[in-house]
Image (cartoon, rainbow, N blue to C red):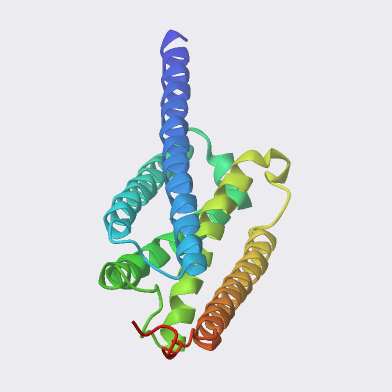
């Protein structure tokens, strides 16, 4: 009896520890990813990457990576815990929907590290999309939209206890897909609006009347 109680207590403590690490990973990744998206949005509005920004963005991205690593480690630990002590939890569709979303988040993170971060470094001191093709611009904006949506969705699922064992994983993932589509469209619209403003500002400056130098008259001569 005492052995059974000790095992149950140890299992509960292990689950609490894994959940704690899971929440830390989510907090780190979500906070840093939100900050990154706000920085990119500011670059779109101001139209220029400050020389100091790439270093800060790389540091913030490293925090996102650390958060994602903690999510995977603690998430796999929780799946192992359920397999050993709580098989019924593995029947919760929400668990597998979260695994699928974190997998998308991971693949998107690999793309960001391979394409987005090097681009920001190269563009330091210039406009974010100066000399960038429309296709590549669209892909970079899509990566940002996928990132922020894929971080907030696990947070929503974590606090949505009424969804446990009720809503199918297909329904959750379909809702996630709709949110992704809305975020991608919104990012493309933001880029077009900022680009249009930049073009108008440039045209306004180029059309500004230049002051003509007055030719000296006889009254001005000594």
Residue 1 is situated, as x and y percent measured from the top left of the image, at 47, 10
Residue 119 is situated, as x and y percent measured from the top left of the image, at 31, 73
Please name the residue shown 47% across and 20% down the image.
8
Res 67 → quadrant? top left
| Residue 167 visible in image | yes
Q: Quadrant of the C terminus?
A: bottom left
Q: Is residue 112 left or right of residue 26?
A: left
Q: Nearer the viewer, residue 220 or 202?
A: 220
Please name the residue shown 45% across and 57% down the image.
39
Task: Look at the picture and state if 146 lies above or below 28.
Answer: below
Task: Look at the picture and state if 139 lies above or below 3.
Answer: below
Task: Look at the picture and state if 64 lies above or below 28.
Answer: below
Please name the residue shown 43% across and 36% down the image.
24
Q: Nearer the viewer, residue 60 or 129?
A: 129
Res 201 → quadrant? bottom right
Q: Nearer the viewer, residue 144 or 6?
A: 144
| Residue 84 visible in image | no
Farthest residue toward the top?
A: 2
Residue 205 is situated, as x and y percent measured from the top left of the image, at 51, 81
């Amino acid at each position: 009896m005492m052995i059974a109680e000790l095992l149950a207590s140890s299992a509960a403590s292990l689950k609490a520890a894994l959940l704690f690490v899971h929440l830390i990973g989510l907090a780190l990744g979500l906070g840093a990813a939100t900050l990154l998206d706000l920085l990119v949005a500011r670059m779109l509005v101001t139209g220029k990457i400050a020389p100091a920004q790439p270093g800060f963005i790389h540091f913030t991205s490293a925090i996102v990576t650390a958060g994602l690593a903690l999510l995977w480690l603690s998430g796999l630990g929780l799946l192992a815990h359920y397999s050993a002590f709580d098989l019924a939890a593995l029947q919760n569709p929400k668990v597998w929907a979260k695994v699928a979303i974190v997998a998308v988040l991971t693949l998107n993170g690999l793309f960001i590290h391979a394409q987005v971060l090097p681009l920001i470094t190269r563009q330091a001191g210039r406009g974010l999309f100066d000399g960038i093709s429309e296709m590549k611009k669209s892909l970079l904006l899509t990566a940002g939209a996928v990132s922020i949506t894929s971080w907030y969705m696990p947070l929503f699922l974590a606090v949505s206890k009424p969804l446990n064992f009720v809503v199918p994983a297909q329904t959750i993932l379909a809702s996630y897909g709709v949110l992704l589509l809305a975020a991608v469209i919104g990012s493309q619209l933001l880029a077009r609006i900022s680009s249009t403003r930049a073009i108008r500002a440039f045209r306004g400056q180029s059309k500004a009347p230049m002051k003509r130098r007055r030719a000296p008259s006889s009254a001005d001569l000594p």
